[in-house]
Amino acid sequence: MIPPRVVVDERERGCGVPEQLSRLNVRVYFSRLPTADYVISPEIAVERKALPDFVSSVYDGRLFVQASAISSSYRKPYLIVEGDIKELTSLTKNINSYYGAIASVTLAYDLRVIHTADPLQTAAAIAALIQHSHARPVPVGFVAAAPKAKDEPQQQLYLVSSLPGVGMKLAKRMLSRYGTPRKIMGLTESQLAMVQGVGSKKAARIAHMLDTLHATQSGAAPKQERLL
């Protein structure tokens, strides 16, 4: 297995983060990067700023120049602000300007902001980004928490919503019309097509799923149990 790797700007050598990344079994390569401090992939890069430098960059305008540069070069840019958040009151002239700057770079440049306390946490955050760099959104049907065992109406709703193309809203409408999941499962394809929000294509998908014989992944029929 190829170990995870990251390209780090030369100017980050003494900050402690590359050393911590190495301890997390991340292979570190140094280079003089024109944009960003840590490049994870062609899409993902991280700009790291110690809290005092972040605050000063807000007032001298560097933050917005750097945010523009990294968001122009990478589709998923990150900004890690490293330091004790309790020091903000002594570092900022106006606390509203700090949060205003974060809101501005987040909304204007689609910059994802992560707060860390020290180089150890920064390394952990970068290592997590590397590990999950290929993560994809969870399908909508799996996002909601599973209903409680005793919540029968909610269980019925989830059961119907699991049908192809049927979300929670349509499932609720179908249950209001037919009353029980069994009646819905027993509808013919033509009857399903007549339900508002289903239509012929979705009805065909539902009927196909309900009527298709289940088989193992290999395509073979399930083995019968051996009688003792």
Image: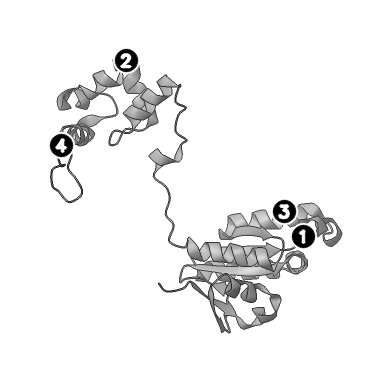
Dot 1 crowding, Cα within 10 Å, few <14, some 14–19, many 20+: some
What amino acid is labelled 2 in the image?
Gly
The quadrant holding residue 51 is: bottom right
The residue wearing badge 4 is: 212
Q: Which residue is mark 2?
A: 179
Measured in 3D between alpha carbons, the distance from the residue under mark 2 to the one under mark 4, in whole angstroms, is: 25 Å
Of label 2 and label 1, which has the lower sequence position?
Answer: 1
CA–CA distance between discs 2 and 1? 57 Å
Q: Amino acid at mark 3?
A: Tyr
As drawn, 134 above or below 158: below
Question: Are discs 2 and 1 less than 8 Å apart at CB?
Answer: no
Say the numbered circle drawn on residue 84. Answer: 1
- Within 10 angstroms of label 4, few (less than 14), some, or many (20 or more) residues? few
The residue lying at 14 percent from left, 48 percent from top is: 219
Q: Would you say the residues marked 4 and 1 are in contact, meaning their CB atoms lie under 8 Å apart?
A: no
**Residue indicated by mark 3:** 99
Towards the viewer: 167 or 221: 221
Q: Marks 4 and 3, how far apart in space?
A: 55 Å
Cα distance between the residues tagged 3 and 2: 51 Å
Q: State which quarter of the image contains the N terminus.
A: bottom left
Question: At which x and y percent is residue 169?
Answer: 39, 28
In the displayed structure, 189 sits above or below 112; it is: above
Q: In the rendering, at what x and y percent does residue 16 appear?
A: 68, 75
Please say if the residues under marks 3 and 2 sit with CB atoms less than 8 Å apart: no
For discs 3 and 2, the disc positioned in front in the rendered view:
2
Give, as a three-letter code, the residue at label 4.
Thr
Residue at 66%, 63% in the rendered image? 121
Whole-angstrom CA distance, mark 4 to mark 1, is: 59 Å
Disc 1 secondary structure class: loop
